[in-house]
Image: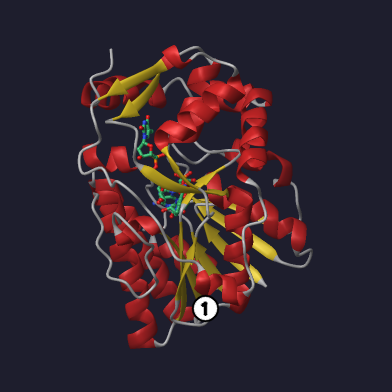
Amino acid sequence: MRLLVTGGAGFIGSNFIRHILTKYKDYKIINLDKLTYAGNLDNLKDVEKNKNYEFVKGDICDAEIVNKLAAKVDVIINFAAETHVDRSIGSPEDFIRTDIFGTYTLLEAAKENKLKFLQISTDEVYGSIEKGSFKENDRLNPSSPYSSSKAGAELLAHSYFVTFGVDVLVTRSSNNYGPYQYPEKLIPVFITNAMEDKSLPIYGDGQQVRDWIYVIDNCEAIDLVLHKGKSGEAYNIGGGNEKTNMYITKKILELTKKPESLINYVKDRPGHDRRYSVDCKKINALGWKPRYDFDKAMKETVQWYRQNKWWWEKIKTGEYKKYYIEHYHERHGLK
Ligand code: NAD
Ligand code: DAU
């Protein structure tokens, strides 16, 4: 199989590429990535010389480059997106452009070249749920510009299945954690802040709930959907680890051996979803369940950030620093 993986220099995409190259020795991967602030070729240093792997720097909104690459593959897996909810509140434009228009550009190429198309979506498209768990056919009810742009993208993908017969699949996973996650998301920002003796900014009361999945479990589920998923269908992928943000914070402080005095309650995220929860019976029936134990994988994740300071220390300067000072600190009332 020849795969065009978009956004493969990001967190999940890079873990997915490594997973595929390790498992399928005869698969070829082209990684198309614009290398935005979140794209990082350091994430793929160990595979860059693999003969089955090629990197192309480019934008999924650029039809010329997308069409050229689509002619060489059997399937497109679209990880490329603007992904951080907080940034989507400050500047939504890039989210609309990449997440929606970029997906459209890829779908056109899939249609013209008769390719399978796997859209990596998110559990956030359902919005918040107080009790119970969302099933795949429940209404999409996104809250943020990020989750709305992701919902738009997957609805567009579905329309290409219905209208043009494109072989479209969608995955909706819960919150991932693990190595190579950009330190703006809860777990890596808190681990690295704790290691630097910086405060851990908890939004609101810290009682919001997320369902955490180790990134390799998600990669294995995406692999299964790619090979066994039914055309036109969406699949929820949850870790089965619903935890409050406060629980995660205390776990990180325990694993980094840092004091609870680092906890800093800050102004809440506007439109903050209280709880995400997905029902995973459909992908369970396809033959997947998460393999990684939460406590063990969290311990290993903290260990990875401890041993790979070279990776995150250089990120936490430059654009990152500017973003935190200009937007994040101001919005959350941080000094
Ligand atoms: P990330 O922010 O770490 O990486 C995104 C990647 O996309 C980066 O490499 C970036 O350079 C690239 N990119 C952005 N705009 C591009 C463009 N216009 N053209 C080409 N490349 C572009 O994201 P992630 O956390 O790895 O998420 C990957 C996908 O999974 C996204 O579609 C996201 O919505 C989805 N998702 C993420 C999570 C999570 O917990 N991280 C959960 C569910 C779904
Ligand atoms: O649910 C899947 C989604 O998970 C993905 O689609 C998104 O791309 C990904 O960013 C993530 O969205 P969240 O908003 O859930 O993740 P984030 O890490 O930004 O925040 C997790 C929770 O922690 C959320 O309730 C907000 C809170 N938070 C986050 C940060 C960065 C804090 O309290 N303090 C923080 O500094």
Q: Residue at x 72, y 47 (%)?
A: 47
Q: List x then y, in percent, for residue 119.
A: 45, 66
Q: Is residue 327 above or below residue 141?
A: above
Q: How is the image coloured?
A: secondary structure
Q: Is residue 229 above or below residue 5?
A: below
Q: Residue at x 62, y 70 (%)?
A: 224
Q: Amino acid at mark 1?
A: Leu
Q: Residue at x 35, y 86 (%)?
A: 162
Q: List x then y, in percent, for residue 206.
A: 34, 32
Number of marks in the image? 1
Q: Which residue is mark 1?
A: 115
Is 331 left, or right, of 254 in this rendering?
A: left
Is 137 left, or right, of 294 in this rendering?
A: left
What is the crowding at mark 1: few (fewer than 14 residues within 10 Å), some, or many (at least 20)? Answer: many
Q: Residue at x 46, y 34 (%)?
A: 247
Q: Nearer the viewer, residue 191 or 3?
A: 191
Q: Is residue 72 visible?
A: no
Is 222 left, or right, of 99 in this rendering?
A: right
Q: Is residue 47 above or below residue 103?
A: above
Q: Quadrant of ligand 2?
A: top left
Q: Nearer the viewer, residue 309 or 256?
A: 256
Is 114 left, or right, of 138 in this rendering?
A: right
Q: Nearer the viewer, residue 108 or 184?
A: 184
Question: Which image quarter holds the C terminus?
Answer: top left
Q: List x then y, in percent, for residue 113.
A: 49, 79
Quarter of the rendering containing residue 90: top left
